[in-house]
Amino acid sequence: MPTRVDHEERRKQIAEALLRIADDQGLQSASMRAVAAEAGVSLRLVQYYFTTKEELLLDALARLGTQLQSRMNTRIEAAGSPLTSRGVVTALLSSILPTDPESRRITRSYAAYYALLLGDPELMKKHATAQPDLLEDFLAERIRTAQEAGEIDSGKDPGMAAAGLLAMVNGLGQSVLGGQRTGDSALSILVHHLDELFQVP
């Protein structure tokens, strides 16, 4: 009998090969042929599942987003009960910081995508901000909820606070990858700023 092919598993195998290249070498090295070699399949098979490189890049980016979301969910579940706005914000932002092998891989892969998008304005326009915008909006809503509960000064702008926190965490992540500081020291800086935010005069 012919062997049944799990098409989703094949797509995942190929997309994860691209993410490994992104992590190790950057996406400039991720030709369709290089992805095929990394996945251990033929170039024709890669082209069967992904007719263009952009399609493959976007599929792998979506899977990377799912991996980060899973990490966030795990951190939120571990934040305790009852779950506070401070607990959610801390869990989300700390999950982004590259403090362990998994988060370092995710951060490096996102950095590879960002570097690629900087050189491709059309791709940047179509796909660069969707996930960051959703996360920023979610954080702003949690900050607004904390204000309503009297946990944050009502005079603060939730959108500005959320944008500032995300920019800080992204910058801290790059400083960890660049060797300027450790993951623990980056986490300490995050906690310091959250202490200042969740402080009512």
Image: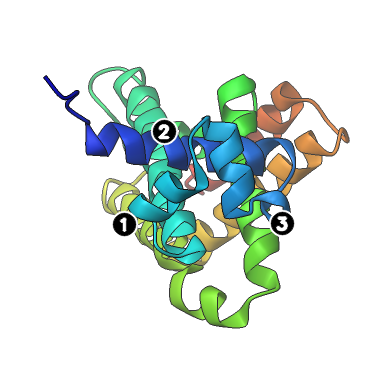
Residue closest to the eye, 28 or 193: 28
Q: Give the colour scheme shown.
A: rainbow
Identify residue for label 1: 141
Residue 152 visible in the shown view: no
* Secondary element at image label 1: helix
State the image coordinates of residue 88 (x, y, percent, origin top left).
36, 35
Write down the quadrant of residue 100 in the picture: top right
Q: Say which quadrant the N terminus sits in.
A: top left
- The numbered mark, 1 or 3, whose residue comes first in the sequence reads 3
1 and 3 marks in contact (CB < 8 Å): no
Q: Residue at x 49, y 40 (%)?
A: 42
Residue lying farthest to the left in this orientation: 1
Identify residue for label 3: 28
- The numbered mark, 1 or 2, whose residue comes first in the sequence reads 2
1 and 2 marks in contact (CB < 8 Å): no
Measured Cα–Cα span from mark 1 to mark 3: 37 Å
Which numbered circle lies on residue 13?
Answer: 2
* Secondary element at image label 3: helix
Write down the quadrant of residue 6 in the picture: top left
